Image (tube, helix red, strand yellow):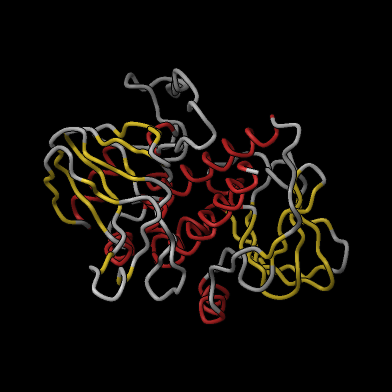
């Protein structure tokens, strides 16, 4: 498989082989800021790739109507002294509908071929200690059949179907844009102060990245140096090897990235303009990874793809919190 074969985030050609087919926009935007941005809404979502991944990496599921698949606020692990042990799973049903509710109010209906429940799974990469809670309750509206998988199964599956990682990253970036647009439309919305960005890479993983990435460039910057500007076209994402980087949106500092933190993924994953600006604070050392390097890395190191998705999930939660204020 060539890198172009792997790069499904490029517009798909038309069935006749002519110009790329346009992707229709959703008929309506989600009803409320709290409504989930479903993967199927994204122009990068490929139901065939998703079903193949779930079928090969996960387990078959068959649930009758009225089954509660997971509950709002539910965390993985032992539920109380005598409770059951919960392991978060994500789902894709090939038949049937699922209702999503939050606070007792309907959010959305998940149709066949759509992925749901992935945020909790992504946030709990094998070996990490973060415990994520479900943000909604999922209940089958009709008899449902399909597949599910947990974090360990997902990471193992990426070695066989690595394109799924890039697809899901693209979908998550679409979600981030969606929430950012909602924030921009709210006059009163503002950051409550910079927070420390999640560092998805351990020191051992950082060393492996430096050793394996032949297409990566190490940058050394002094205090105040501009790394990227909001709205610009970019060709690299960055991983912090030392020092601090301030990330700002519309002039407001929203994150401080330190050792192991990644930023600038949007321009690399789906070649979109920069959504934020970044400035070095003190002496900074960065690993710059271009598009080809990232695709090859996800192929060879599935854990890296999982780590990047975990970082995006944390950023999305933080922006949703800002939106709710």
- Residue 52 appears left or right of 288: left
User: Against 297, is 179 above or below?
Assistant: above
User: Against 300, is 140 above or below?
Assistant: above
Residue 50 coordinates in the image, percent (x, y): 29, 44
| Tally of marks | 0
Residue 229 coordinates in the image, percent (x, y): 77, 47
User: Against 136, is 132 above or below?
Assistant: below
- Residue at the right extreme of this rendering: 224
Q: Residue at x 50, y 37 (%)?
A: 34
Q: Residue at x 54, y 68 (%)?
A: 200
Rendering quarter of residue 136:
top left
User: Against 41, is 72 above or below?
Assistant: below
Residue 241 coordinates in the image, percent (x, y): 67, 74
Query: Between residues 259 and 10, which one lies in front from this camera angle?
Result: 259
Q: Residue at x 44, y 38 (%)?
A: 36
Query: Between residues 302 and 135, which one lies in front from this camera angle?
Result: 135
Query: Between residues 149 and 202, which one lies in front from this camera angle?
Result: 149
Residue 93 coordinates in the image, percent (x, y): 21, 40
- Residue 95 appears left or right of 152: left
Q: Residue at x 64, y 54 (%)?
A: 236
**Quarter containing the C terminus:** top right
């Amino acid at each position: 498989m060539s890198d172009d074969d792997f790069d499904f985030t490029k517009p798909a050609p038309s069935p006749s082989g002519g110009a790329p087919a346009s992707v229709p926009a959703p008929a309506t935007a989600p009803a409320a800021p709290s409504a989930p941005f479903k993967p199927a809404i994204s122009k990068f979502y490929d139901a065939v790739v998703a079903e193949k991944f779930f079928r090969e990496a996960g387990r078959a599921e068959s649930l009758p109507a009225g089954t509660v698949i997971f509950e709002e606020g539910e965390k993985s692990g032992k539920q109380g002294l005598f409770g059951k042990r919960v392991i978060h799973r994500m789902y894709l049903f090939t038949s049937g509908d699922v209702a999503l509710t939050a606070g007792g109010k309907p959010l959305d209906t998940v149709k066949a071929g759509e992925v749901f429940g992935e945020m909790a799974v992504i946030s709990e990469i094998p070996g990490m200690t973060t415990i994520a809670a479900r943000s909604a309750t999922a209940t089958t509206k009709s008899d449902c059949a399909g597949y599910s998988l947990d974090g360990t199964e997902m990471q193992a599956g990426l070695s066989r179907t690595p394109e799924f990682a890039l697809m899901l990253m693209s979908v998550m970036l679409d979600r981030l844009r969606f929430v950012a647009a909602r924030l921009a439309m709210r006059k009163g919305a503002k950051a409550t102060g910079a927070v420390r960005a999640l560092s998805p890479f351990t020191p051992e993983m950082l060393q492996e990245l430096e050793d394996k990435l032949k297409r990566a460039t190490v940058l050394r910057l002094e205090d105040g140096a501009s790394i990227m500007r909001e709205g610009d076209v970019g060709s690299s994402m960055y991983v912090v090897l030392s020092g601090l980087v301030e990330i700002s949106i519309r002039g407001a500092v929203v994150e401080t990235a330190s050792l192991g933190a990644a930023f600038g993924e949007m321009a690399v994953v789906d070649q979109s303009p920069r959504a934020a600006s970044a400035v070095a604070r003190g002496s900074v050392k960065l690993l710059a990874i271009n598009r080809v390097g990232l695709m090859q890395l996800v192929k060879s190191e599935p854990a890296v793809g999982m780590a990047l998705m975990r970082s995006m999930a944390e950023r999305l939660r933080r922006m949703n919190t800002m939106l709710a204020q």
